Amino acid sequence: MRLSTRIAIAVGLTTPLLVLAAGWLLVRLVADDLQTREDARLRERAAVAAPDARRLLRATAADRPAAVEQARERQMLTSGLDVGLRLVGPDGTVSSAGPQPGADAPLPVQAAPVPRTVRAGGENWRVLSTPIKGGRAGADGTLWVFSPDAASRAQIALVRARVRRVALLAAPVSGLLAWAVATRVSRPLRLLQRRTSGLDPRCSATRLDHTPTGIAEVDDLARTLRTVLSRYDEQAARTAEALATARSFSAAASHELRTPLMSMQTNLEILTAHPELAADDRGQVLHDLRHEHARLLGLIVMLRELGRGDLIEAEAFGPVDLVDVLEASAADLRRRHPRARIEVTGVPGLYVRGWEPGLRIVLDNLLTNALVHGGGREGESGGSVEVALRVERVGESGGAVAVLTVDDRGPGVPDRLRDKIFERFHRRPDSPGSGLGLTLVAQQVALHGGRIRVLDRPDGPGARFEVRVPAQVDGVPDAATEVTLPPHRDWLIATAERSRVSGAEVPGPGVPGPGASVPHDFHKDGS
């Protein structure tokens, strides 16, 4: 059923009810007005006839001549005009005339100055009683004034009949008028429906083009439809990115895993074909197998984490204490490399709004990278890593930036490689890593609205990795704060140059953007 038809039916049913309700109220008001007017007339007639009634009672009590009594009676009845009068003395009715109920009609027991309704002989009478004080013994009585209620009842019945006729007529007339008005008013809604019916977001990029109509409901509906379509586009884009990430994961895994798998196969064939192999040679083959297995496992883990970063949503972000994450990462590194020297200094209570597993990935990979370059590989004497976490105020608004620096005492990163070490699978020939460690770092820094750059260690040979992300030092960030993620997260899909540019386009609040004094470069050192 169309909206205009629904409105017409609703109005057509509601209007007669409203008319009847208004008519009932009108009948009550008319009845009250008529009764009030009739009561006023009865009081007026009683006030005029009361003096003549008093004189008549006195004449009757004094046994005046009949002519005198008749004269007094005529004067009283003449003052009554169009109402009925009945004068009752101590010995019964003294005089009565005019329209009034029969003598057997039940009248009020006590006289009262307020008119009342009495029913007698199938008719209603309005009755007013007035006590008469004659001033002598046997001269007291009661004056009754009567008025038939038929005229008032007739007028009320006439009003009721007219209300019913108006209600019956109002149903179709109001329904037709409501249908015409609703049809006219709902025209913008029908136009909006026709515009949206031709939209198919699956096969066309055309979206709703709505001109404001001035009708709040229609314009709100158009805005809602636009929002729904934009969310559909976002979800479709995220779905496409997820599918592309899955395909890229499969392609990268098949490409990068081929070499370690082939090497492992060769070593296994050697062990199988030469059971008499010398102990030293067998140990070398097993060492190679363990090395390739570790590399294979690390590569799979790195690819998985890179895919998670590309698919993470804003709902996963929340308040994170950077110092807690840093201390946990450093403690884990000390357990794995007990001979390494790891110095950590930080500012307590430094919070960021982020994804805690992603921040842990940043710290783990930066610390491992620094330890590898600082001489901390297995079998060597150890390495030295210095980690510092401080806060800087940025701009007049008082925004805060957490600055993390990781220093090693290795050979450093040459300038010509600082634009490449964040590319996927870029690593030194002798690197034990997968070539994805710093790619993960760059990805997570970009997701957290920050920046990273590679510098020389300020107090000697070595490299410094500096990470800057928006932070809060005046309490825990509000959990309801909206997180804005990069529009395109394609670190597992894109080429190295595309990944670098993608990261450079999403600086965090209060952090200088691309082209500012602090460059936004993503690099990788081969961890």
Image: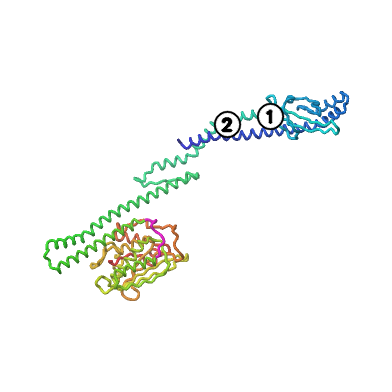
Q: Quadrant of residue 51?
A: top right
Question: How many other residues sit within 10 Å of disc 1, few (<14), some (14-19) or many (≥20)?
Answer: some
Q: 429 left or right of 85?
A: left
User: Does the rendering let one see residue 38?
Assistant: yes
- Residue visible at 68% across and 29% down? 152
Q: Is tag 2's residue or tag 1's residue first in the polypeptide sequence?
A: 1
Q: Which residues are magenta?
A: 313-321
Could you say which disc has been placed on residue 152 in the image? 1
Q: Is residue 284 magenta?
A: no
Question: How many other residues sit within 10 Å of disc 2, few (<14), some (14-19) or many (≥20)?
Answer: many
Could you say which disc has been placed on residue 167 in the image? 2
**428 vs 155, nearest the viewer:** 155
Q: Secondary structure at mark 1?
A: helix
Q: Amino acid at mark 1?
A: Ser
**337 vs 108, nearest the viewer:** 108
Mark toward the viewer: 2 or 1: 1
Q: Quadrant of residue 139?
A: top right
**Quadrant location of the C terminus?**
bottom left
**Quadrant location of the N terminus?**
top left
**18 vs 176, nearest the viewer:** 18
